[in-house]
Image (spheres, rainbow, N blue to C red):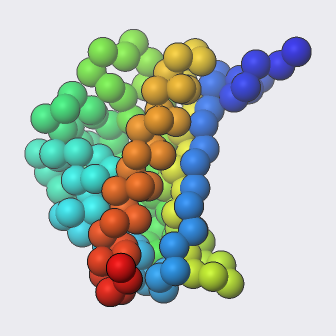
Amino acid sequence: MKEAGKTKSVGYEIGVRKTFQIPLEKAWKILFSEEGIHIWLGDAKNNDIKVNQSFSTSDGIAGQVRVLKPFSHLRMSWQKEHWKNVSTLQIRITKVKSGTTISFHQEKLLNGDQRHEMRKQWKQVLDQLKEILKNSIGEK
C-alpha cells in the first residue's frame, strides 16, 4: 500500500488550497504585501521577492526564489533551520468561477513527519490569509 504523499522521484509532497471570493489581482497584491509575506514566509530579513533573490527569516527559514510569474505563481527553494533537506515550495493563484484559489504545494520533503508538519503549517497560513482577504473586501 502506497504511503500518503510519497512520490517516486521527489520524496514526499503536500498540497493545500483554498478558494476565496476575491478577484485574482487583489489576492495576489495581498499575498505579496508586507502583511501577506509575513503570514506565509515569516519575518523575512528582505521582503523583496525577486527571481534569484535569497531570503532568510527570523524563524530560521531560508531559500531562494527560482520563478516568479506575477498574478500566477512563485517557486522557491525552502528549508527550515533544523532540516537536513531543502524542499521546493510553489505558491499558485488561479482564477475560478467563485473567485481565486490560492494553493501551496511543497515537494522534496524528507518523510511523512515533514509532510504532516507542512500540511498543518500551510492550512494555518490559508486560515490566516482568509482573515486578511475577508477584511479586504469588507466581509464579516
> What is the x, y in percent for residue 124?
40, 46
Residue drawn at x 48%, y 85% is: 23
> Quick check: can you spot residue 24?
yes
> Quick check: can you spot residue 9?
no
> What is the x, y in percent for residue 50?
30, 59
Give the camera-side residue of 83 and 70: 83
> What is the x, y in percent for residue 25?
43, 83
Quarter of the C terminus within the rendering: bottom left
Q: In this view, does 23 lie above or below 36?
A: below
Quarter of the N terminus within the rendering: top right
Q: In this view, does 33 lie to the left or right of 83?
A: left
Residue that extends furthest to the right in the rendered view of this protein: 1
Residue drawn at x 59%, y 18% is: 112
Residue drawn at x 37%, y 62% is: 129
Q: Residue 26 is drawn in which quadrant? A: bottom left
Q: Residue 131 is drawn in which quadrant? A: bottom left
